[in-house]
Image (cartoon, rainbow, N blue to C red):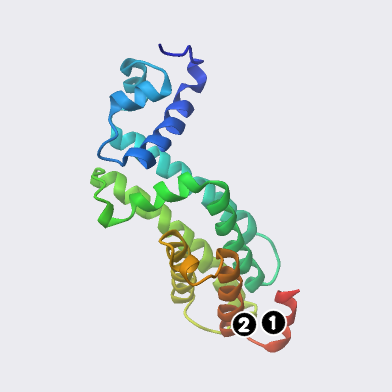
Amino acid sequence: MTENIDVTNTREIILERSKELFLALGYHKTTMRAIAEAAGISTGPLYFHFQSKAEVFFHICNQAFDYLIADFRVVAGDSSHAARRLKNIYYVYKKFYYREPQLFEIMHLATDPMAGIDLPAELVELLKQKAQEKVSIMEQVTSEGILRKELRPVEPRKLALYLYSVAEGIFLSNRIGVLKQSEISLDEMIEAAIDLVGLGMISCSENVRGVRE
């Protein structure tokens, strides 16, 4: 028996239930009928909101990127030392990982070629642009830091990509159990990365003390 769902909430309920299905069954075994049943609606209202399973999956991923990008922009936009802002971006990433584990997993499924998610090319491109936006935010912070002589004069985009890759590598290592096998927590690894990477990019020793406070 289906639930009576407020029309204004139907879309969000569909996305929430779909998240759970995609993670429990996988993308390929999740069907539009299964999504409708999980959301407590018929397929008619489902197709009113989304034309296909791929579109549902895309909107979940897009929502995840939007949440994370918004948080990136908040910490990147303050006036503190550039290294502190980059450090806080790492903390934002970690907080999102803990707060929205389902969104984090699905967001990475969408951009993993090994997952075999058959999204239309135009939707894949939009998600790639969102991933690139995260890098661009970090690049902006590094550019400002170099201009203010807070960071070493390296190529901003390379530094941003490096920082992004380090973060992604840490979270991947945690997800596949490498950190657990090594008896190192995610929090410890994030702190180690901030410490080691920070020492390499900060322009002078007196700034290191300010960033670590």
Name the quadrant of the C terminus: bottom right
Q: Is residue 208 left or right of residue 130?
A: right
Residue found at x 47% / y 26%: 13
The x, y position of residue 83, in whole percent, is 63, 73
- Find residue 23 and report its image quarter: top left
Residue 76: percent from left, percent from top: 61, 61
Decide which of tag 1 and tag 2 comes sooner along the chain: 2
Question: Cα distance, mark 1 to mark 2?
Answer: 7 Å
Q: Are marks 1 and 2 in contact (CB under 8 Å)?
A: yes
Above or below: residue 135 compared with residue 149: above
Per the image, label 1 sits on a secondary structure element best described as helix
Which residue type does callout 1 highlight? Val
Q: With respect to residue 123, does 16 lie above or below?
A: above
Residue 132: name its quadrant.
bottom left
Image quadrant holding the N terminus, namely: top left
Residue at 31% across, 18% down:
43
Count of picture labels: 2
Q: Which mark is residue 202?
A: 2
Q: Residue at x 42, y 18 (%)?
A: 40
Q: How many neighbours does mark 1 have within 10 angstroms: few (below 14), some (14-19), or many (20 or more)?
A: some
SS at badge 2: loop
Find residue 187 and report its horizontal and vertical position in percent: 60, 65
**Residue 123: numbered disc:** none
Q: Which residue is mark 1?
A: 208
